[in-house]
Image (tube, rainbow, N blue to C red):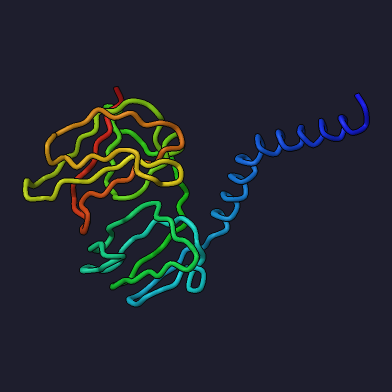
Amino acid sequence: MNKNKKVIFVLLMCVCIASITYPYVSNFFTHKEQDALQQVTLKSGEYKVGEDFPEGQYDVQSTTDDAMFMQKKMSNNDKWMGISFSDGESIPLKGTFILTPSKRKPLKTDDTGKYEISNSGYYEIGNQIPAGKYMLTYESQSSMIEKPLIQILSKKRSILKGYSFEGAKQYTIELKKEEILEIHKSLFKENNAGVILNPM
């Protein structure tokens, strides 16, 4: 192998190694940035991400009734989990909210092995919810409560599948690692319905 071929071989090896390790290195630094975020309290007004608080993924909790966060009505103690905010994004709100950096902790099951998700938000598959097949249903104390909208998103948050419950009471779904389960207990208002994932 002559000198030129050796140089080309080494360059190709470097490109291959970089392409294999990039997702892991990128993920490491993303988690480091996320871990460095601090809790933020915001009151009525309009805020710009990157100026008023750093970009990142936050769990949002209302501390007032009749609150409005990005067109979603929320009451005291309502939560909206795993919301990603990007630099330059404008956030209108009414009321007082606590933004806590998302820790993406695994969800716990009840005594029967079901996951009951009580907060709207974005849940990572493989991290917060195990990959696998589930029976997807919801429970509510009132027939007057608006049915939930649930979507499966790719890692980059493009929509893969959606479920509205308008024509069905339950769905069989398959959740894959690195997908995101997006849950809106209703589109414009939090309610006391619970979304149920029953492993199959």
How many numbered marks are there? 0
Q: Residue 169 is drawn in which quadrant?
A: top left
Q: Is residue 199 left or right of residue 167?
A: right
Residue in the image at 57% along x and 49% along y: 31
Image coords of residue 157 (percent x, y): 41, 47
* Quadrant housing the C terminus: top left
Q: Can you give x and y, in whole percent of width and height, for residue 79 in the image?
A: 31, 56
Say which quarter of the image contains residue 18: top right
**37 and 88: which is toward the camera:** 88
When the figure is inspected, residue 150 is found, relative to residue 175, above or below; the finding is below
Whether residue 113 sits left or right of residue 130 in the image: it is left
Residue 99 drawn at (x, y percent): 41, 62
Residue in the foreground of this view, choosing between 57 and 154: 154
Q: Residue at x 60, y 40 (%)?
A: 23
Work out whether residue 184 or residue 64 is closer to the camera in this orientation and state it.
184
Residue at 8% across / 47% down in the picture? 142
Q: Is residue 43 above or below residue 149?
A: below
- x and y percentages locating residue 59 in the rendered image: 39, 56
Q: Which of the pair 55/80 is nearer the observer?
A: 55
